[in-house]
Amino acid sequence: MTTRLAPGGEDLLDELVRYRRHFHQHPELSLQEHATAGFIERELHAFGYDSLRTGVGKTGILATLVGGRTGPVTLLRADMDALPIEELNDAPYRSRNAGVMHACGHDGHMAILLTAARVLRERATDIAGTVVFCFQPGEEGYAGNKLMIEDGALENPHVDRTVALHLYSGLDAGRIGVRDGPFFASSDRFEIDLAGKGGHGAMPQSAVDPVVGAAYLVTLLQSIVSREVAPQQPAVVTVGALQAGTTFNVIPERAALQGTVRAFDAAVRQQLPERIERVVAGLAEAMRLEYRFQYHFVYPPTVNDAAVNGVVREVAREVVGAQDVVDPHDTVMWSEDMSFMQEQRPGAYFLVGSRGHRQGGTPQHSAHFDIDERALGVGLDMMVGVALHG
């Protein structure tokens, strides 16, 4: 692990790892990141940041640094929340909070941004413009990014552009993934309740079976993507939960389904609720069922601005070399609430590889997730480099 744009020797690298492991040992769930925010606040004060905005979007923190040269106001963001997962790793820095784990890399994101705040504070005269360090709560499904916007995170100062990174187990450490336009998918969810008439499992003719309806529905929903969405427009409709019945020989009154919907194109995203409900309504009529359909728009697609992404590319080539910049990287079906800020300001979201030979290859959101900590130095150089670029 090396740092080129943030020179500091082994002490700086040790600090990155120390921060990351501290956060990993003390994870907190979405919008409950009180101890995490308190730790970050104390460190920022120690670096010389006197005027902090705290409690932004529940538990978020904003620190502002005015550079010595004119330039744009750049917001650099790190997410703070962990997941409700019991960690199964046996590392000395494993989670100390039962049932909670940093299984997506947010511990590394915070370590990178916190260390970048220290490095850039010492190099303020070299910064072209102003940097806003944004430590954001509630990314994992709670739209903390939107909550911060509602609390004024993009104003005072007025943010001109945003930049965020994500450590990624699908990319080798020492590589960076960049893509213009839609990069991460939207994430929406639906709930479907089917109501029939219960009865004895041996006398189905006397019942109206919602289980059979639910089984057909899981299959029918797949025809929306395969037959109603153009092949060049990726989309996903997945039923992730189906609950019905209490025992083997009783036809229940109800069946409930929950699912997720992903898309990259805004028009496709808007059309999917109507298409799903049309299938549900048709099946319900055919099978004498009643239905209730609820659809929730959650996170929009994350769309990268070409100009801001150009800065990321330029810095990435300096940090890892052109041969290790994956451009364009494949689209990712994850969702990301940084999409809310990127709807309001031009922004760039990029990937930093965290997969090594011995660790870091386990997918995100796994109880065995870990990172190759060499990735931290790359992430630090990227954030410092973008801030200095102007």
Image (tube, rainbow, N blue to C red):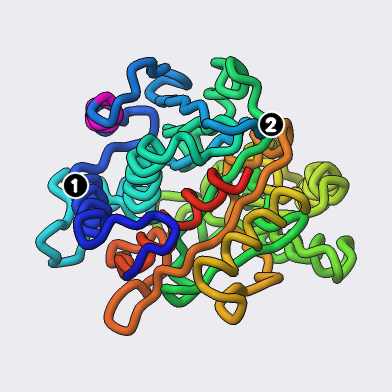
Residue type, label 2:
Asp
Q: Which residue is mark 1?
A: 22
**Quadrant of the rendering where the N terminus is positioned:** bottom left
**Quadrant of the rendering where the C terminus is positioned:** top right
- The residue that appears at 87% across and 46% down in the rendered structure is 267
Q: Secondary structure at mark 1?
A: helix
Query: Badge 1: few (under 14), some or many (20 or more) residues near its Cα, within 10 Å?
Result: some
Magenta residue span: 38-45
- The residue that appears at 58% across and 57% down in the rendered structure is 350
**Residue 364 sits in which quadrant?**
bottom left
Residue closer to the observer: 231 or 104: 104
- The residue that appears at 56% across and 30% down in the rendered structure is 130
**Residue 136 sits in which quadrant?**
top left
Q: Are marks 1 and 2 in contact (CB under 8 Å)?
A: no
Residue closer to the observer: 372 or 245: 372
**138 to the left or right of 122:** right
Identify whether 10 is placed above or below 15: below
Q: Which is nearer the N-term, disc 1 or disc 2?
A: 1
Q: Which residue is mark 2?
A: 160
Instruction: Locate residue 286, reporting x and y percent.
Output: 82, 52
- The residue that appears at 29% across and 62% down in the rendered structure is 367
Instruction: Locate residue 308, reporting x and y percent.
Output: 70, 48
Label at residue 247: none
Residue type, label 1:
His
Q: Nearer the viewer, mark 1 or mark 2?
A: 2
Q: Secondary structure at mark 2?
A: loop
Query: From where the camera sits, is residue 257 visible?
Result: no
Query: From where the camera sits, is residue 217 visible?
Result: yes
Query: Badge 2: few (under 14), some or many (20 or more) residues near its Cα, within 10 Å?
Result: some
Identify whether 228 is placed above or below 255: below
